[in-house]
Amino acid sequence: MSRTVESIFRPFNPSDAERSDRSAGDRARHRLKVRESIRENIADIIAEESIIGKDRDKVIKVPIRGIREYKFVYGDNVPGVGQGTGESQNGQVVGKAKQPGKAGEDKAGDQPGSDYYETDVTLEELIDIMFEDLELPDLERKALRQLESFRIAKRKGYRAVGIRVRLDKRRTARERVRRKLATSASRLAREKDAVRVTAEVTPGTERRFPFHEDDLTYRHMITDVKKESNAVVICIMDTSGSMDTMKKYLARSFFFLLYQFICTKYRNVEIVFIAHHTEASEVSEEEFFHKGESGGTFISSGFSKALEITQARYHPSLWNIYAFHCSDGDNFDSDNPAALRAAKELAEVCNLFGYGEIKPLGSRYYESSMLNIFRRLEADNFQTVLIERKEDIWPSFKAFLARDRGRDQ
Amino acid sequence: MADYALKDLEYWDARIREKVAELGLDCFPQEFEICDHGQMLGYMAYSGMPSHYPHWSYGKAYEKLKTLYDYGVSGLPYEMVINSNPALAYLMRDNSLCLQILTIAHVYGHNDFFKNNFTFKTTRPEFTIGGFKARAARVRRYVDTPSIGLEKVEPLLDAAHSLALQCRRNLAVKKLSEEEERDRLVAAATPRADPFQRIHRRQEFVEPDLRKVPPTPDEDILLFIRDHNPFLHEWEKDLLTIVHEETQYFIPQIETKIMNEGWASFFHKRILDSLELPQELHLEFLVRHNQVVRPIPGGLNPYHLGLRMWDDLERRGDHPTKEERETLPPGKTGRSLLFETREVDRDVSFIRRWLDERLMRELDLFRYEPKGDDLVITDVSDDTGWQQVKETLLKNIGMGGIPVIRVEDADYNHNRTLFLVHAHDGRDLQLEYAEKSLGYLHRLWGRDVTLETVVNGKRTFLTFGERGFSAKAAK
């Protein structure tokens, strides 16, 4: 009989399992790198359709390209060996060629793993990353439009002085007990002498120990001012026949970014959708993005409607107004002077007013453009952008925000 | 907890150990640790080591494993075994009793292989766990040192990890010091004594260049940099040593994947068949066993290939065909062939020696090549193609999947440029990866680095210097 090998079992220890999250540090470090990588690729991620118009808590998948572990590896002209089911023949196609940097089959762990992978990020987190570098300059100057929305009296700590209604009886009593204990040592010593004199103390006649001024403790109240800052995002879009789905999608992406960004900077943000062709009307979000209209275009109608709404509901003295207009620039020539005039007026009431011309690739060479017309508009807070592709959205968004100088009151 | 208690495991383990002894396996003492799936993921991310130095890539590995596991893309392995003495294995507590029995038997197979295969002779298994722990402590100390810190340690580890597998493949071959190499060069160049020197033309003496560094091309890139870049700090040299040593631990495992998994599968089958398991356990075992060792159409399952080859090897010893009997040394039985082979072969030699045309045909191995967007079969295992298939297989297994790159000259063009040559065997480098890896090499070497390789059939020099990367075709 040959010698058997020894063995021992170490049983499962739940508390070890609790404590054994050894990769936590490395995961955090990796997470940080992912974040950096997202920041570098933010323009690509925004160009991805999936994030636009989603709920803030929504978890989205973001493709990560940055964090590869580079090694010397073979390229894509490498033959390999596989196993068939018994009927393999020359010339038979057995799979797709691997993309560079992506692993085909798993060979003993020596190939680079699929380094292109997705990570889960909440939209909120992504928006934070996106807007980390962006600032609305001079936000503080608009003091008037920062409303003190409500005042409340809030308890904060205790004071030795105060008005009688705020007397904290419990604490006061406690203070007295404390003082009594602190003085008892010396008192006992004194009472010893006293006892010797009076021989005995009849019950109920022990020395009273009354409250003292020092015991009184008052609740301290402060008034807490909640600063409320209001902003309204006015989305104006040309819904004339020439705006197709692609153009609307690009417009929508831009509006989405604008709204999300404004949300990070103000407490109370409202959004108004104005759709116009030759006439303008305020519509719901659903209608705004999905309802197609037909007919021609009077851009001035959209601006006039926006002015009307701001006067009625969002007065510039109380609201920060951000207006953005998306169109393909196909305006009736006769409307151009009116549009320019209305735009000027709108620029005066807005913090920031932008015009985005959406020309899917190449089409700007044969269609008319409003960019030249609006060039004549002289206002610091007005910005035109040209969006040709999904990839343009982020750069133009940044350019747009750079214009916000804040209006002097 | 599943349908069993620890004493069930101990009972079956005792029975398995009897069988292990009967079958003649020769194992290290074995430790089993029961863990949950979270711990298992943790162990997997750190290659099974109870302690390991920190680096973000392990966090990445963990996230990736966890994602795959959470989405059910891949399950967790039933076990992990560490080549150490005593051998350490993890068992997942969520597994069924049958799986645990299978796993325990499988672990003893690996254990025996670790102890006896020649590639593992250099790994010093009694120090494995302690070594990893000591290195982890060293790295942590550098991270905690105020003048170094994570922001310096991490980039250095990034660079070192990138080049870690550029090292010698066969650790059983002794590495010579530079002195010994020079002696060898001189000895090789010196004309041998020739008893017929009167009638022979005199052998010419070509003086070897003894000032060259390295005297002969060196594959251990990290060690070469450590020893020849005088501007590295001591802690940097130490980190290079650490990464190199950790890699050395994994080389034998990479080099024997097919043999090792096949060997363990061969014996777990053998052991469980002889255990007289209750019927329902035995049926479950057969299902699990087939899941593990089934062929993957289009791919290559090392468990399957390994198991089939060991099976065939045993048959070859016990019931050889007429031709096989002629090539086999006399007195061999299946058993002696098995145990001898597990000691002296690694994947490359194992396949070269024992994978023959008949078995390849049975396995239906084929060779494919990328053509356009598709992978297309170019050769199948028939009379004309099997050798091609086998050659390709030999190139791809073990460390064959990693390009051979050697340091040729540390003072190329007399300006301390590091000159390396890629031993091109028909497979081009992936250029984006090569560029980034050369960047790391440049960071460690501190001066320009030039790599000679072949791109699309043209000899090409890839250089990474102060001004970044450039590629130049040779005239």
Image (cartoon, coloured by chain):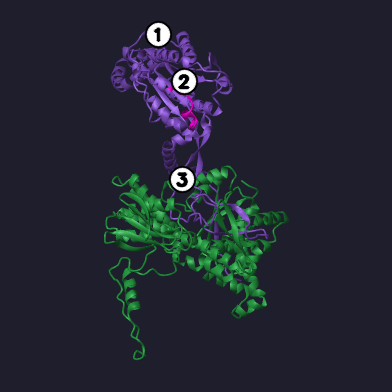
Chain colours: A purple, B green
Give the residue at x 37% y 21%.
A404
Please name the residue that numbered disc 3 is placed on: B59
Q: Mark 1 lies on which chain?
A: A
Rounded to the nearest angstrom, the CA distance separating label 2 from label 3 is: 45 Å
Residue A1 on image: x %, y %: 61, 71
Rounded to the nearest angstrom, the CA distance separating label 2 from label 1 is: 57 Å
User: Contact, CB < 8 Å: mark 2 with mark 1?
Assistant: no
Decide: few, some or many residues near mark 3? Use Cα within 10 Å; few <14, some 14-19, many ≥20. Answer: many
Instruction: Answer yes or no: is residue B300 visible.
Output: no
Residue B232 on image: x %, y %: 29, 55
Q: Which chain carries label 2?
A: A
Please name the residue that numbered disc 2 is placed on: A325
Residue B30 on image: x %, y %: 53, 60
- Determine if marks 2 and 3 fall on one subunit: no
First of labels 2, 1 by sequence position? 1
Instruction: Answer yes or no: is residue A400 visible.
Output: yes
Residue A387 in the image: above or below residue B371: above
* Numbered disc 3: secondary structure: helix
